[in-house]
DNA sequence: ACGGATGTTCGCGC
DNA sequence: CGCGCGAACATCCG
């Protein structure tokens, strides 16, 4: 689930819930989310500390505590952060922070594709190779046509595949890459290094619009301390092409298509994306 | 009932 | 360098 908008929402939620608060007790379960680190290390490093700083880089979250400690989080495919009452049980919770206000913040992740890694400081976490390797952020860079041109120069890969490569541009996932290409009217098979300046300019604008729309979709009224975002079972798909193969294109009326690309499903309009 | 797909990333082999 | 594949894991849909 989590692409840039969801991770940005998670960062905002963390700030609303935890900034300036003391973590009475931090704990983790022995899952692969911790990789090689032990749950005890996380508990020792983070218990008793105050959260001072939360930042997002691409789909990663960086937390800074005082006295100095850092935590790097990735939500993987099914990860999310939730806040619960102290006595509530939370299925698939793998990391928890018991706060000084009687609430508990959980990192929940059924599929365990996520990651949590402790560091001695925020700065040390920010220097981790996973973070250092990230390209410019799709939302914060700002991702101008010129910067896009630089990142995509010479690439012979389809633009849809390139947009998923976090080293090129950080934050887009399968859903938002497809949405951005639709907004830019660019065919997903176009080679990334062969896009013209006008096309890159459309893509730059399209990425910004896609991320803004994604954020608006998951937090219509901003961050609410207690209400978490959950898609309603019967709710309508709010996206332009994602998950809409067979339906008419909202721009030209042609039937939307889907096909496999780099192991993922790409949705697009064969008529107005060129 | 079961096969296939799901918003991520990594490592491998060609 | 680029790409396809499988793996990690749990759930859902048809």
Image: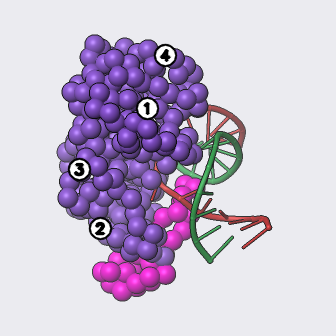
Chain colours: A purple, B red, C green
Residue A55: within the magenta?
A: no
Residues at badges 3 and 4 in contact (C-beta under 8 Å)?
no
Q: Which residue is mark 1?
A: A96
Q: Quick check: do tags 1 and 2 share a chain?
A: yes
Of pointers 1 and 2, the one earlier in the residue sequence: 1
Of pointers 4 and 2, the one earlier in the residue sequence: 4
Mark 4 and mark 1: Cα distance apart in space:
14 Å
Q: Which of these two is toward me, A166 or A227?
A: A227
The image quarter containing residue B1 is: bottom right
Instruction: Report the label total.
Output: 4
> Could you tell me if residue A240 is visible in this image?
yes
Label 3: how many Cα within 10 Å (few below 14, some 14–19, many 20+): some
Of pointers 2 and 3, the one earlier in the residue sequence: 2
Q: Which residue is mark 2?
A: A183
Numbered mark located on residue A3 in the image: none
Label 4: how many Cα within 10 Å (few below 14, some 14–19, many 20+): some
Q: Which residue is mark 3?
A: A223
Residue at image location 56% in from the left, 63% down from the top: A260
Q: Which residue is mark 4?
A: A41
The chain to which mark 2 is attached is: A
Mark 4 and mark 2: Cα distance apart in space:
46 Å
Q: Secondary structure at mark 3?
A: loop
């Amino acid at each position: 689930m989590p692409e840039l908008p969801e991770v940005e929402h998670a960062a905002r939620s963390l700030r609303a819930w935890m900034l300036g608060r003391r973590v009475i007790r931090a704990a983790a379960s022995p899952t692969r989310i911790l990789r090689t680190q032990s749950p005890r290390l996380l508990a020792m490093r983070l218990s008793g500390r105050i959260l001072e700083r939360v930042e997002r880089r691409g789909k990663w979250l960086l937390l800074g505590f005082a006295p100095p400690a850092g935590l790097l989080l990735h939500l993987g495919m099914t990860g999310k952060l939730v806040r619960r009452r102290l006595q509530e049980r939370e299925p698939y919770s793998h990391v928890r922070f018991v706060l000084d206000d009687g609430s508990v913040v959980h990192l929940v992740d059924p599929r365990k594709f996520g990651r949590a890694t402790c560091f001695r400081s925020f700065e040390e976490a920010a220097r981790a190779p996973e973070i250092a390797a990230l390209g410019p952020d799709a939302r914060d860079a700002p991702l101008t046509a010129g910067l896009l041109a630089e990142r995509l120069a010479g690439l012979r890969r389809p633009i849809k595949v390139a947009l998923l490569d976090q080293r090129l541009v950080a934050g887009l996932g399968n859903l938002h890459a497809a949405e951005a290409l639709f907004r830019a009217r660019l065919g997903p098979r176009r080679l990334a290094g062969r896009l013209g300046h006008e096309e890159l300019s459309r893509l730059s604008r399209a990425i910004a619009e896609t991320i803004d729309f994604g954020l608006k979709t998951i937090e219509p009224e901003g961050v609410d301390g207690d209400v978490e975002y959950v898609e309603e079972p019967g709710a309508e798909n709010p996206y332009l092409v994602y998950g809409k193969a067979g339906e008419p294109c909202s721009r030209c009326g042609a039937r939307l298509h889907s096909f496999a690309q780099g192991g993922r499903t790409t949705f697009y309009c064969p008529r107005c994306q060129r």
